[in-house]
Image (cartoon, grey):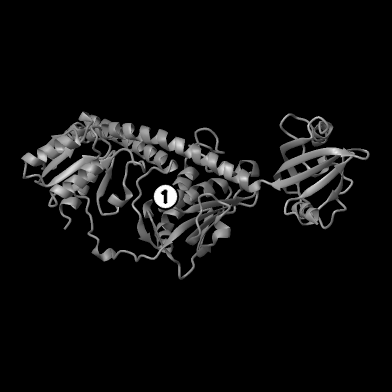
């Protein structure tokens, strides 16, 4: 009775053949009854043994032959179900003498879930390591780019009389901007970018960018949209979602060289604990589902699991960086969402983005001020707190060029001392990552406590979650990402100073 009702599959082997099995074994392999199993060799339910080139039969015979000397063995194996699908098992084998030789008692345990968890853990560890690497690179590189772009903009202003020099400066500026975009892409891949989430209607967002998608895809690819009318709202960075959809569309275009159809659909979906459990990064709850499908060539099964890996690409050299899909993955998971891919060679690819639902309402857009192309200036006094001397100098020069009076400090402690001596400061503009025992966020908190009338604006070239305090940022504080250009600095400063 214990044998028949065990939850784990149990099989008895004698003379190299299965002679008895319980119902759990039959169910695990998907057979109608035990007839297929009984009297068969253990290797007949296994694919070819790959690790050392031997066949399943040779490896199984070795294990059975060693049973007398090793009466208890535990090892991993791969089994084939009746429908042809394979799955990993952990086999516990116990040998004991029988009437006509050794009798082997084997217990199997399906370890598919464990293997999936191990895979997810390895991927998470890899992304954490990449995040630390890119975070450090981004901090230093963005500081350098801030200095480069800032100086080029100051030179550009005085180079307009020399057409050749002006063209050279403009080319250098364009290259610097591309360098900044590359850094942003790396931060997106490692889930270290600073997001600006807003309550978003995905139907509206896709409708707004549809003309851009059509221009990007070309005339030989048609776009079809299918929206659910009562779509839920999601709180997500809309600009990053636009980039994600564009990335998916461009990938689809490359897979439909002879033309095809791109379909973008939205729907509402609720995931319960059973649906969420198989995936490490998925939590139960309500989601807005954004699905992007194409009729392209599809992705081979052997590389489907790698498509979100950073720098992995199937495109020929020079045609792709391998950052597109990994950026989408990083953005969605950083936003507490989930992404799935389904593809088959010759039958296209479907990518599903699960975006967490929000109960908040969309901000009244009519109340949002319209920005112009004019660079806003001012006359207020700004305390610039930055430990990198070159970055501090360029910030001071850009602010001075905008009409502001700038005061400098290299540490949080020095900034507090200056505030104690100057009553005319209107804004503290501080880097977040600084030496000396006080970060920019800690400085901002102290300023808010001691000088509640003062405005604070932060900047950073590194957006690691261990540096940025989400609770502090959600209180409405502005963070200007490095490298910033003159227009961005001017607009951010004016927005903070003019805020009630």
In the image, residue 384 sits, relative to residue 220, either above or below, namely above
Q: Mark 1 points at which residue?
A: 243
In which image quadrant can residue 260 be found? Answer: bottom right
Residue at left offset 25%, top offset 49%: 478
- Quadrant housing the C terminus: bottom left
In the image, residue 71 sits, relative to residue 345, either above or below, namely above
Residue at left offset 73%, top offset 51%: 8
In the image, is 493 to the left or to the right of 307?
Answer: left
Q: Nearer the viewer, residue 453 or 254?
A: 453
Mark 1 surroundings: few (<14), some (14-19) or many (≥20) residues within 10 A: some
Furthest residue toward right: 100
Q: Position of residue 4 (x, y in %)?
A: 80, 56
In the image, is 86 to the left or to the right of 189?
Answer: right
Furthest residue toward bottom: 230
In the image, is 28 to the left or to the right of 300?
Answer: right
Q: Where is residue 61 in the image (x, y as percent from the top left)?
A: 83, 34
In which image quadrant can residue 360 be found? Answer: bottom left
- Quadrant housing the N terminus: bottom right
């Amino acid at each position: 009775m214990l044998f028949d009702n065990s939850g784990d599959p149990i099989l008895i082997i004698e003379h190299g053949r299965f002679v008895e099995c319980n119902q759990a074994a039959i169910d695990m392999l998907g057979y109608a009854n035990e007839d297929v199993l009984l009297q068969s060799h253990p290797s007949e339910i296994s694919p070819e043994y790959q690790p050392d080139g031997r066949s399943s039969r040779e490896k199984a015979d070795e294990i059975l032959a060693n049973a007398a000397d090793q009466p208890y063995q535990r090892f991993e194996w791969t089994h084939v179900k009746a429908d042809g699908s394979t799955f990993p098992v952990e086999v516990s084998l116990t040998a004991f003498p029988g009437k006509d030789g050794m009798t082997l008692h084997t217990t199997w345990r399906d370890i598919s879930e464990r293997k999936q968890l191990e895979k997810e853990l390895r991927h998470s560890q890899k992304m954490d390591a990449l995040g630390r690497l890119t975070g450090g690179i981004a901090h230093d590189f963005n500081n350098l780019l801030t200095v480069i772009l800032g100086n080029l903009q100051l030179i550009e202003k005085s180079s307009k009389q020399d057409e050749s020099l002006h063209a050279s400066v403009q080319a250098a500026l364009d290259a610097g901007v591309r360098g900044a975009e590359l850094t942003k892409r790396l931060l997106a891949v490692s889930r270290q970018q600073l997001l600006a989430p807003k309550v978003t209607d995905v139907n509206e967002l896709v409708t707004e960018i549809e003309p851009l998608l059509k221009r990007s895809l070309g005339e030989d690819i048609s776009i079809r949209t299918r929206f659910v009318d009562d779509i839920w709202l999601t709180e997500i960075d809309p600009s990053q979602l636009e980039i994600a959809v564009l990335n998916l569309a461009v990938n689809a275009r490359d897979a439909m060289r002879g033309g095809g159809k791109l379909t973008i659909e939205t729907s509402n979906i609720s995931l319960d604990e059973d649906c969420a459990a198989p995936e490490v990064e998925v939590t139960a709850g309500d989601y807005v589902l954004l699905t992007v499908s194409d009729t392209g060539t599809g992705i081979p099964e052997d590389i489907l699991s790698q498509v979100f890996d950073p720098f992995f690409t199937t495109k020929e050299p020079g045609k792709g960086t391998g950052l597109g899909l990994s950026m989408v993955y990083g953005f969605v998971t950083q936003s507490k969402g989930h992404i799935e891919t389904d593809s088959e060679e010759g039958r296209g690819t479907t990518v599903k983005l699960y975006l967490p639902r929000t109960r908040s309402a969309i901000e009244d857009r009519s109340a949002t001020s319209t920005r112009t192309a004019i660079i806003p200036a001012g006359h207020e006094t700004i305390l610039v707190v930055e430990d990198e001397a070159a970055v501090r100098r360029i910030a001071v020069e850009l602010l001075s060029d905008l009409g502001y009076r700038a005061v400098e400090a290299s540490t949080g402690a020095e900034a507090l001392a200056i505030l104690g001596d100057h009553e005319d400061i209107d804004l503290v503009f501080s880097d977040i990552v600084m030496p000396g025992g006080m970060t920019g966020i800690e400085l901002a908190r102290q300023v808010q406590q001691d000088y509640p009338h003062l405005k604070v604006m932060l900047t950073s070239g590194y957006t690691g979650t261990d540096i940025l305090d989400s609770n502090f940022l959600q209180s409405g504080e502005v963070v200007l990402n490095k490298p910033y250009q003159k227009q961005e600095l001017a607009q951010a400063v004016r927005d903070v100073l003019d805020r009630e």
